Each structure stands twice: as structure tokens, then as C-alpha cells.
Amino acid sequence: MNLVESYKDDLKLIEKPWTGCWITMTVIALLLLPWFGNEHLIYMGTLIFIVSVGIMGQNILIGYTGQISLGQAGFLAIGAFSFGHMAQMGLPIGLALLGAGCMAAFFGVLVGFPSLRLKGPYLAIVTLGFGIAVYQTFASFEVLSGGRMGLVIPKFPALFGLTREASMYYFSLFLGIAFTLATYNLISSYMGRAFVAIRDNDIAAEVLGVNLTRYKLLSFAISSFYTGIHGAMFAMFMGFIDPQMFNFSESLIIFVAVVIGGLASVEGAIFGAAFVILVPQVFSGYKEFVPVIFGVTVIFIMIFEPLGLAGRWFKMRLYYRNWPFR
Amino acid sequence: MVNFIQYLISGLSAGSLYALVALGIVLIYRSTRILNFAHGDMATMGTFFAFSLLSWRFPFYLALPLSMLFGALLAVAFYFSIIVPAQRRDATMLGQITLTVGLSMIFQGAIIYLWGTDSKMLSFPLSDTKTWQLGPIYLNELSVGTLIVGILGSLLLYILIQKTRLGLAMKATSENLPAAQTLGIPTRTILATSWGLAALLGVVAGLFLAPALILDPFFMLEPFLKGFAGAILGGMNSLPGAIIGGLLIGIIENLCGGYISLEFKNTVPFIIIIIVLLFKHEGLLGKEFKERI
């Protein structure tokens, strides 16, 4: 977008003072939301922050590293259920979250191993099979899933005199911002560039000295860590989980969110999350049309704007920055 | 032993339908390198169309070809209206796969809107309660009919691909698209034909699966995934591989259901595929094209 003169310039998150200005304003608006917004708005906001963490993770895997994965629901389930069990054992929330993320990351590495040799459709079927296997496992072992009634999870406590919903909102806002910053830093590091190199051509990347084994596995581990956190937060938000929440269509929705938001874009992940959360809410009277809207949007995006909502956003900003020149 | 043969037969009959689904997926993958996630939903659409025809008192022998035609037309329309413009705009492979995911969601919504979510009974001429006894083994009408349809469908496809000029053109197009264009093969038409054929096979599979499963908007999801798994197991660009893969999935699934546990009937085939892919990562009969940088 603009001239980069040094590595330090390249690492800058905020390039123009004006950008810094509106980002600060957005963050302040989000911070003040519980004061002037109603409960529904807080609910939506919390959900969007939670989901955007997971979408960011999948964007690292699908958008940056270029590995097709359709087993996200499996990682979500692993994150959610391990968080649930750890929280029931009485672990503090932070530790349980970390544990859930690490558990998901461990399984991510397990699924990542086949990815070292498989590509395209073959990788898709392996991840898909993993998702189904996880779903079946949780559905048929009542010890894991908490039986027919599902697993009841202690909700986030009320902190600092706020309501329980507002504290959950702030916690997920904090996590959302933390993960966004972490992702920006990750993709501008050596690791992020290695991921992009693997996506563009893995053989060429290996020739240039990228350790394929390490970085493919790392990509799987990191993305499933994010998804695990997403699952755990979702479980805490809902207060109740059962395996039915993590079926194949959940994986498809995450995939669609990544694509609609924009492949290989961090802010795209947030847009994508907002899209898949807001559309079912806006069209709640016409439930059967929600998949149609998703489908039509995906097709339109793929044909007319392959960079997704993030690409549109980028072009819009560019237009106003260069105005009145084109 | 008797049990084993019984499981084998029911596995073969389910597997022959998975093979039809797998053939559809492989036909499309081989010619356009697109993984068609809408395959199952196209088949569902065709099956529901047949359901409507049958409930309007159309005879079955008329409803079957009409719904096959309907499915094929849907696929061809999708190819021309969405895949071709996307390819003109240089869509990536992942982008084209995503297009089919989008299409599958649209179909799902349309099916739910048009026919509702409640499950339906398809009035089918073959029943699975009518059984014949062959020594100690029971055969039911439906599974025998299914097996015959599966074998017949694969055989007809084989003849079409191997013995006709159309099949030759299809092979040429899938081997090398620019060369086929240079030789004057109308590649667009040929590719559209592949899409149509694939959807047609899918609708046949859907129609014969509907009486065994319950006809609801999501009934093809599992057979589609199994067919996909079969296609992968056989190798994504080998048509005989698809048939073998589909049959193997059917047999493995039924043996697992019989001997191991009914709950993991759906999972064990996937685990076996993952293991096979770890050792032979292009499927049993697949030969992926070597890649150049």
C-alpha cells in the first residue's frame, strides 16, 4: 500500500496516524458498549469475539499455509469438552483455557502428520474423517460427553461489580484483541513467511531452506490451539455443551467464514466471524434461507472479490486515502 | 461364516451405491480438478424431484429418467453459470472448491424451503421386507436391485468412457486440456457432460439409497462422505479405483457394524482410509500428476 523503507517499517501494525485514530475509537466504542448497548448487543459482541479467534486460527491454516482442513468441528469439540472437564475438576479458568488449547494443539499435530505427505483432496478427507471420528467418539462415550443431558459448564464469574454478561464480554474482548495482535506478529515473523512460502509452493519452500515438517506441524498446532480456545470460550459462554453442536456443518460454516472474510487476512477473520454470526441473527425469521445466503455470498465473493470482505475493505480504504485521485 | 457372507452381501450392495457416488466425484475431479462438495446435495435435489413426481402419480419408470435428467441439468447449469465465469477470472483451486461448498449450501436451503425438514417415504417399487432364502443366506429385493443397478451403472459408464468417441474426448480433455482444445475437441461441452453424468450417477445412487435410509434434506450427507472416502481410497483420478474404493468402503463398514460395534460403523472406514493414505498417499490405484515448480 505504501513505501516500506526498513524492516522496522514493515513490522509496524499501524501505518498512518489516521488508522491509529479510528482503531483507537473502535476499541473505545467496544469498551463502552456494555454501558449503552442492550443485552442482545453484548451477546452478539461476545459471540463475535469468541468466533473470530477460531476463524483467525483456521485462516492461519487455510489462508496462510494453504492446507485444506474440514475437521475444525473436531478441534472445537476437543477444546470445549476438555475445558468442560477441567473446569468441573475445579481448575482456574485461565489454566483450563490453556489446557483446552494445548489439548486441541496436540490433536492438531496428530492430524498434521498425514499432511506432511498429503495434498488437496486427500488432506481434506483426512481432516474430515478426523472431525467425524471426534464427533462419533463424543457421541458414543458418555464419560466424555457427560451423557444424554450434555456437559454443564460453570459460566464466567461476575467480576469488579459488573454483571456476569459484561464480564464475559470484556474477557472475550480481551482475548480477541490479544489473539489479533498475536496473529499479526506471527504472520510478520519468520514463521509467518515460512507458512506463506509453503502455501505458494511447498517444494520451492523446502529448497529455500524452510523445514517443511516443522512448519506444517506448527501451522496445524497453532491453528488448532486457536480453535481449541474458541471451543472452550464457546462452552463457557453457552454454559452447556453436547456433541450435536460440533457436527460437519459446523466445520463447513467455519470454512465459509474464512473464505467470506478473506483468505490470508487477519481483519478478514474478524469480518468473517461477524458475518456468520450476524446473518443468522438478522434473518432469524427465515431460518431456511440462512444457508442460501451463505452459499450465494460465497459464490459472489469467489467470483467477484476473491480476497473476501477484507479485500473490499482494503480497496475502500485505498479509495478514500487516494481521493480524489484514482 | 454365514454371518460373514450375509455382511459381505449387504456391504456389497451398499458399496455399489457408494461406488456410483464415488464415480461421480472422480469424474468431476479427473476432468476439472474440482472437488465437488455439492455432489451429495445435487443427488438429494434429484431424489426429492423424483419424490414429487411419484407423489403426483407419475409411474416409476418415468420418474427415474426424469429425475436423472433434472439432476444432470442442474449440474450443467451450475457448470456454465458459475464455474466457467470463475475460471475466466482465474479462480484458484481452493476457490473453485469453495464455490461447490457454496452451491451445496444453496441446495440445502432450497430443499428445506421446497420440501420441508420432516422425513418422507418414497414409494419405491422394490421393498426390503420381501426376502428370498438362498441356503442359509437371506437376500432382500432391495439390496439385490441395488447391487444390479450399481454394477449396471458402472458397466455403462465403462462402455461410455472406453468405447465411444465421447469417452475418448473426455479422456483427452482430462489428460491435457490445451492439447484437446487445439485438436478441436469442444472442451466446454465435454466438461459440462462430465458434470451432468456425475450428477446423473449421484441421483441414481440417491434414489436407491432413499428407501433404505429416511428421505430428509440431509440423507445424502453420509453416503456422499462415504463415496468421497471411496474415491480417495481408490485414487482420485482413477475410475476403476472409485468402484473398488466404494465397494471396499461398503464392505468394511458392514463388517465393522457386524463384528466390532454398530456405533463406530461410520468412523472405522475413515480410520482405515487414513491408515491407507499414510502408506499409499495417492490411493490404491491413483496416479497423481507429478508437480513442477
Image (tube, coloured by chain):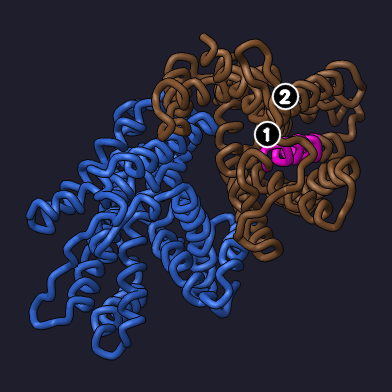
* Residue B205 painted magenta: yes
Tell which chain the image draws in blue.
Answer: A
Q: Find disc 2 in the rendering and name its residue.
A: B144
Left or right position of B220 against B77 = left
Q: For the magenta stretch, what is the residue range?
A: B194-210
Magenta region, main secondary structure: helix
Q: Which of B64 and B133 is in front in this view?
A: B133
Subunit of label 2: B
Amino acid type at mark 2: Val
SS state under label 2: helix
Identify whether A97 is placed above or below B39: below
Q: Name the residue under label 1.
A: B128
Q: Residues within 10 Å of mark 1 (few under 14, many from 20)?
A: some
Which of the 4 image quarters holds residue A161?
bottom left
Q: Quadrant of residue B57?
A: bottom right
Q: Is residue B271 left or right of residue B123?
A: left
Coordinates of residue A146 in the picture (x, y in percent): 24, 50
Please check the rendered image and state whether residue B284 is part of the magenta-colored stretch, yes or no: no
Q: What element carries label 1?
A: loop
Q: Nearer the viewer, residue B25 or A68?
A: B25
Task: Identify the amino acid type marked 1.
Answer: Asp
Q: Residue at x 29, y 40 (%)?
A: A141
Colour brown maps to chain: B
Question: Looking at the image, is mark 1 or mark 2 earlier in the sequence?
Answer: 1
Residue A169 in the image, given as x and y percentages of width and height: 24, 73
Q: Residue at x 83, y 53 (%)?
A: B53
Query: Left or right: B274 with respect to B167?
Result: left
- Residue A268 figure quarter: bottom left
Q: Which residue is drawn at 54% across and 26% down?
A: B293
